[in-house]
Image (tube, rainbow, N blue to C red):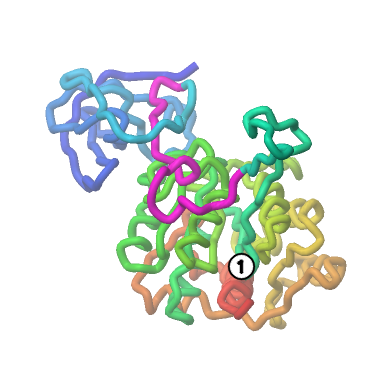
């Protein structure tokens, strides 16, 4: 069951569209998704969800503002009809790429109904209904387990090529796009061209129902390099199937079927205290075993791999799916960008193996199709 507390806002800061951070009257921290709960001012009495913090878990080290009791929010009417966060009290309508009636999407492929000469097309039989699927040929997509890794990779590609990839956020992590300070910084500095929130996720500049549609939306905008990853807050267990980013395998299959070139970004670490994540994570190994055969795994062409992690034999087992690349120096690219990236509570540049494998994936994404 969720847990709640009634506390007052002592200080409101770091306000940007859709988000405000709040220091509460007991000294704890909270964040308010202001598109859902409305604006918050110092002195307001708030109902906050304390569940995760009470259990010693994440949510960025903060409670979540549920309702402003002092100034209840009546919401605002917008043009969209696609519901995100469906069936929760906070469900909200958005205008999704798939249903937009104007702009770039008017000529996108759709169902095509045919009928015999002289017949009413509305009476077409199932066999007469064709489907013109969009082609993603020429689009390169990397699929990344961790939000921080994905945006560091995008910033690295931008730094070496001058081309900003697009970011497609899945709904296997945090649903609100606005929670990510890193994504906001990448957008502001032009390190990602734009972003799409998909599935139940919401709040990015573009909304889409599916990841495949999100990539198609970017392709329509002539964005040919794409990073697909969850938002903040990856959920993982010791089970080979018990981690939230496993859905990337399904997304890879659909994108591969639409003609995109796809690559899995290996999650790796030289400093993670958990042995299952030392070297290449067991989650990445599970994903590679299940992914489409044309989905490659960028591998560092380097002698700096952790010899104790067993990565060399795993790479050999990948066979032709291993795309060997000289890694781009991720730490140098981040230093040049001025972007501060932390992953699993540590500065990303302090994790040599993470940077090596991300650098290989950045080299694949930056390469010509």
- Which secondary structure lies at badge 1? strand
**Rendered image quadrant of residue 120:** top right
- Give the number of callouts: 1
Q: Is residue 14 above or below residue 75?
A: below
In-front residue for pair 182/352: 182
In-front residue for pair 109/94: 109
Which corner quadrant holds the C terminus?
bottom right
Q: Position of residue 248 (x, y in %)?
A: 65, 50
Is residue 89 in the magenta section? Answer: yes
**Rendered image quadrant of residue 321:** bottom right
Q: Position of residue 250 (x, y in %)?
A: 70, 47
Q: Is residue 240 above or below residue 296?
A: above
Residue 89 seen by the camera: yes
Query: On the rendered structure, is 37 left or right of 177?
Result: left
Task: Identify the residue at image location x=27%, y=18%.
Answer: 6
Query: On the rendered structure, is 108 left or right of 313?
Result: left
In-front residue for pair 317/275: 317
Q: Tell me if mark 1 has few (under 14), some (14-19) or many (20+) residues whose alpha carbon lies within 10 angstroms of its own.
A: many
Is residue 196 in the magenta section? Answer: no
Residue 236 seen by the camera: no
Task: Identify the residue at image location x=69%, y=71%.
Answer: 298
Q: Position of residue 134 (x, y in %)?
A: 62, 55
Q: Position of residue 195 (x, y in %)?
A: 43, 55
Query: On the rendered structure, is 368 left or right of 177?
Result: right
Task: Identify the residue at image location x=51%, y=69%.
Answer: 350
Q: Is residue 306 above or below residue 245?
A: below
Query: On the rendered structure, is 45 left or right of 189?
Result: left
Q: Is residue 286 above or below residue 309?
A: above
Which segment is the magenta one? 88-110
Task: Identify the residue at image location x=25%, y=29%.
Answer: 76
Residue identified by numbered label 1: 140
Magenta stretch, main secondary structure, is loop
């Amino acid at each position: 069951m969720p847990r709640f507390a009634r506390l007052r806002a002592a200080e409101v800061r770091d306000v940007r569209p859709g988000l405000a951070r709040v220091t509460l009257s007991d000294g704890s921290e909270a964040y308010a998704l202001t598109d859902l709960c409305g604006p918050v001012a110092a002195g307001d009495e708030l109902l906050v969800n304390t569940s995760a913090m009470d259990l010693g878990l994440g949510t960025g080290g903060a409670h979540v503002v549920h309702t402003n009791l002092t100034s209840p929010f009546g919401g605002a009417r917008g043009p969209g009809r696609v519901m995100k966060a469906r069936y929760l009290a906070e469900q909200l309508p958005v205008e999704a790429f798939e249903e937009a009636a104007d702009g770039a999407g008017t000529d996108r492929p759709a169902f095509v109904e045919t009928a015999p000469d002289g017949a009413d097309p509305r009476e077409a039989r199932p066999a007469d209904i064709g489907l013109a699927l969009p082609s993603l040929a020429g689009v390169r997509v990397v699929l990344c387990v961790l939000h921080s890794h994905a945006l560091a990779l995008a910033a690295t590609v931008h730094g070496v090529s001058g081309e900003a990839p697009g970011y497609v956020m899945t709904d296997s992590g945090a649903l609100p796009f606005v929670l990510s300070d890193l994504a906001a910084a990448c957008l502001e500095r032009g390190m990602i061209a734009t972003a799409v929130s998909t599935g139940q996720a919401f709040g990015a500049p573009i909304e889409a129902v599916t990841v495949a549609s999100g990539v198609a939306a970017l392709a329509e905008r002539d964005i040919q390099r794409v990073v697909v990853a969850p938002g903040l807050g990856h959920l993982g267990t010791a089970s080979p199937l018990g981690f939230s980013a496993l859905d990337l395998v399904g997304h890879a299959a659909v994108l591969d079927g639409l003609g995109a070139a796809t690559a899995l970004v290996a999650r790796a670490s030289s400093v993670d205290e958990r042995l299952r994540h030392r070297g290449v994570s067991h989650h990445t190994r599970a994903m590679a075993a299940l992914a489409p055969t044309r989905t490659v795994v960028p591998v560092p062409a380097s002698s700096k791999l952790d010899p104790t992690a067993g990565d060399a034999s795993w790479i050999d087992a990948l066979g032709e799916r291993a795309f060997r690349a000289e890694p781009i120096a991720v730490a140098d690219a981040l230093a040049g960008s001025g972007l501060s990236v932390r992953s699993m509570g540590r500065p990303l540049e302090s994790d040599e193996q993470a940077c090596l494998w991300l650098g290989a994936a950045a080299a694949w994404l930056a390469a010509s199709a």
